[in-house]
Image: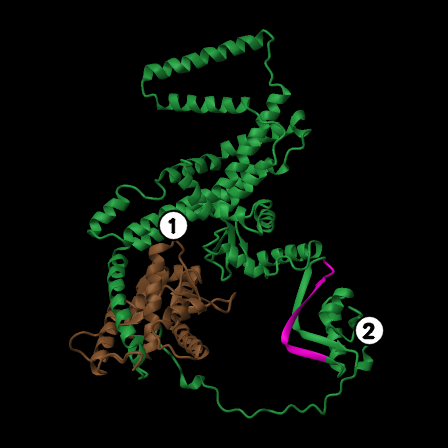
Chain colours: A brown, B green
């Protein structure tokens, strides 16, 4: 009896945590174990509200995703909303994704940690070179904050200028998303009448 | 390796160990790192910890040498030493910490070891080393022999040898190692043990290099994926099955077996009990060297497991294909992004991305408007008189004599027209720590004759009651005579 109670409580904890955000194995190993044990129940529950449970055991994180209804039948309203991203924020995400891929190819370190300076340097190549550098850095910082709000990067507690790129970024900024981004840039180039040279 | 002119030139220019020897501040770096890492046998030190150690060292140096030497801050030095161009420290983030940690690189460790060997040993034992070499050769020849007859022959010969020895002892001839031979062997034991301990850094580094090679191979692989997997995995695990991996595993298995641990401890104890050894004051750390090995070995073991796991993850089916595709799309995006650089899309929505989780806001969870309640204090009367205790105890924790500090300032201003707080505290060191500093600040703010210069910062140091150095950074405070 108490066993059942216990597992019921664990299930609720798992579910609530998932609804609140990505669950990381290393943040709470015990809860992660519960999740793995209770997978089937969690999946069933999530399906009822139009969500599917995704687990990446290798990477050690789990999250909920909207089930895209295909074919007939009335569509459920989306529980997880979409976030609208401006161009620079989208670009920042793409560049961070590249950093992550390069990091995996060249380092045995699991965590990708960058300084704010690294990020500014990485993106300034793609931003118009204005005269006001301070303003530009501030802008990059505000973009970065947005990315942090989304949960893809995390400011480290130790140094205020150090950032960890969370590996969940891999899942969301995937080939499909990047492809779409690429297409939109191309469309934009066509509609905006092509590029503008610096000296014009 | 060959030591041709070009090889040496290469080492001279690029080897971080040699760079360390050539560095102007080599005495500082090497002595400090030796004290911080090698002496206590530490494998990683957190940044803040290492900075405070270095700060103390720098402070002492500036006191004893001169004020101007080593002008940079401790953190700047550490960053510099860990930079790729130097490579004397390895900076890394442990999985469970947000703070960077530092460890020595094998190159630095080698330099320290080499410098130590320069100081010359009392005598160099040649005999015991020759014996060791003989023993190794014998092991190799015998161990590689597959012919049964030869093996039995060798064992027979050994048996005869032992029989002869037993016979000799029975007849009263007991051969004993003399003191020189014992000391010589002990010295060899101590060098080899210490070497082994320091080898772990190099072993780990080798593992990391191996891992990197594999990653590079994967990243640049052009052929079919099946071939790649075959090439890399074949029938073995690249890391644990390398020479390095096997040797390490065998070492580890031997060290971990309870019987060999027991035997080792027992042997050590007996050796340390010998008169000629204990009288030569051996390094006591050697007594527990096998625990050091265990500790260092365990860390290496974890690194290997980690590397294997991450490599496997990297090779994961989908990730591999997706990474290739992603890189080519990213190239295209970069090109596009460069072309729109001066005419960036301004609209607030360029792309969409699912949030990581649903936003659940329940209307009832929003707090209702609540007027700020004013707390009526008039009715509360604090009756302190009734409580009988000496409130002086609260104030006497640290007593700072304000008059004395004011006198210090006045005395100083008799010879000069103005003096900074920093200069003042150098002449009259803070004895009550922060409380005294605060008192100075309050004196400064009470008189219009002092200036707070917000543009400049000053560091003020003092030694607290535990003998540790503390430092406060504050705007420059200047006391003026008039």
Q: Is residue A176 above or below residue B79?
A: below
Quarter where residue A91 is shown: bottom left
Residue B464 falls within the magenta-colored stretch:
yes
Q: Few, some or many C-alpha atoms within 10 Å of disc 1 (few <14, some 14-19, many ≥20)?
A: many
Q: Secondary structure at mark 1?
A: helix
**Closer to the camera, B106 or B417?**
B417
Q: Residue at x 53, y 33 (%)?
A: B192
The chain ID associated with circle 2 is B
Q: Residue at x 30, y 69 (%)?
A: A173
Quarter where residue A79 is shown: bottom left
Q: Is residue A74 above or below residue A103?
A: below
Residue A64 position within the rendered picture, expressed as x and y whole percent measured from the top left: 32, 70
**Closer to the camera, B321 or A190?**
A190
Prevailing SS of the magenta stretch = strand
**Closer to the camera, B72 or B186?**
B72
Q: Are marks 2 and 1 in contact (CB under 8 Å)?
A: no
Residue, far front = B5
Residue that badge 1 annotates:
B307
Residue B471 position within the rendered picture, expressed as x and y whole percent measured from the top left: 66, 65
Q: Is residue B223 above or below residue B452?
A: above
Same subunit: marks 2 and 1:
yes
- The label shown at residue B405 is none
Q: Residue at x 36, y 42 (%)?
A: B240
Q: Can residue A41 be seen from the camera position used here?
A: no
Residue that badge 2 annotates:
B392
Q: Which residues are magenta?
A: B451-466
N-term mark: 2 or 1? 1
């Amino acid at each position: 009896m108490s066993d059942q109670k216990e597992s019921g409580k664990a299930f609720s904890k798992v579910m609530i945590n998932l609804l609140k955000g990505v669950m990381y194995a290393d943040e709470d190993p015990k809860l992660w174990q519960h999740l793995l044990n209770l997978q089937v129940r969690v999946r069933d529950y999530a399906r009822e509200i139009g969500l599917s449970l995704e687990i990446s055991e290798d990477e050690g994180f789990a999250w909920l995703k909207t089930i895209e209804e295909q074919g007939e039948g009335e569509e459920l309203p989306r529980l997880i909303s979409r976030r609208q991203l401006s161009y620079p924020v989208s670009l920042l995400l793409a560049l961070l994704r590249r950093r992550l891929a390069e990091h995996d190819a060249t380092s045995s370190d699991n965590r990708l940690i960058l300084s704010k300076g690294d990020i500014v340097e990485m993106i300034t190549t793609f931003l118009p070179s204005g005269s006001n550098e301070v303003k530009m850095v501030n802008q990059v910082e505000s973009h970065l904050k947005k990315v942090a709000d989304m949960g893809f990067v995390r400011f480290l507690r130790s140094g205020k200028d150090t950032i960890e790129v969370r590996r969940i970024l891999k899942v969301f900024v995937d080939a499909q998303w990047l492809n779409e981004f690429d297409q939109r840039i191309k469309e934009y180039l066509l509609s905006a009448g092509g590029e503008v040279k610096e000296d014009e | 390796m060959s030591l041709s002119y070009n090889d040496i030139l290469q080492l001279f220019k690029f080897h971080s160990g040699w760079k360390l020897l050539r560095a102007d501040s080599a005495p500082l770096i090497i002595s400090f790192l030796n004290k911080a890492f090698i002496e206590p046998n530490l494998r990683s030190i957190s940044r803040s910890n290492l900075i405070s150690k270095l700060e103390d060292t720098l402070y002492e140096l500036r006191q004893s040498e001169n004020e101007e030497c080593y002008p940079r801050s401790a953190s700047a030095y550490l960053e510099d030493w860990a930079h790729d161009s130097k490579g004397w420290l390895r900076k890394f983030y442990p999985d469970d910490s947000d703070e960077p940690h530092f460890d020595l690189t094998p190159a630095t460790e080698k330099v320290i070891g080499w410098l130590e060997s320069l100081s010359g040993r009392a005598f160099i034992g040649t005999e015991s080393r020759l014996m060791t070499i003989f023993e190794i050769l014998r092991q190799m020849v015998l161990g590689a022999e597959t012919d049964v007859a030869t093996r039995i022959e060798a064992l027979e010969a050994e048996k005869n040898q032992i029989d002869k020895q037993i016979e000799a002892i029975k007849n009263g001839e007991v051969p004993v190692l003399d003191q020189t031979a014992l000391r010589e062997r002990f010295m060899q034991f101590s060098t080899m043990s210490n070497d082994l301990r320091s080898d772990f850094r190099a072993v780990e580094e080798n593992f990391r290099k191996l891992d990197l090679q594999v990653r590079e191979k994967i990243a640049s692989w052009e052929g079919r994926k099946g071939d790649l997997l075959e090439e890399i995995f074949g029938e073995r695990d690249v890391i644990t099955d390398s020479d390095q991996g096997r040797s390490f595993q065998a070492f580890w298995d031997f060290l971990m077996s309870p019987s060999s641990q027991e035997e080792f401890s027992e042997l050590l104890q007996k050796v340390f009990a010998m008169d000629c050894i204990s009288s030569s004051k051996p390094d006591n750390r050697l007594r527990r060297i096998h625990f050091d090995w265990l500790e260092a070995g365990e860390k290496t073991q974890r690194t290997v497991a980690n590397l294997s796991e991450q490599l496997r993850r990297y090779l994961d089916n989908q990730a591999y294909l997706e990474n290739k595709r992603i890189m080519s799309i990213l190239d295209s995006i970069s090109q596009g992004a460069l072309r729109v650089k001066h005419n960036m899309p301004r609209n607030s929505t360029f792309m969409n991305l699912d949030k990581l989780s649903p936003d659940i806001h329940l209307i009832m969870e929003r707090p209702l408007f609540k007027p700020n309640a004013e707390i009526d204090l008039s009715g509360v009367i604090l009756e302190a008189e009734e409580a009988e205790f000496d409130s002086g105890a609260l104030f006497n924790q640290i007593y700072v004599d304000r008059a004395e500090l004011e006198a210090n300032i006045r005395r100083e201003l008799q010879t000069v027209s103005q003096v900074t707080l920093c200069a003042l505290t150098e002449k009259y060191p803070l004895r009550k720590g922060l409380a005294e500093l605060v008192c100075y600040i309050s004196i400064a703010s009470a008189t219009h004759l002092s200036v707070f210069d917000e543009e400049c910062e000053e560091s003020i140091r003092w030694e607290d009651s535990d003998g540790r150095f503390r430092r406060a950074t504050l705007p420059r405070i200047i006391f003026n005579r008039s």
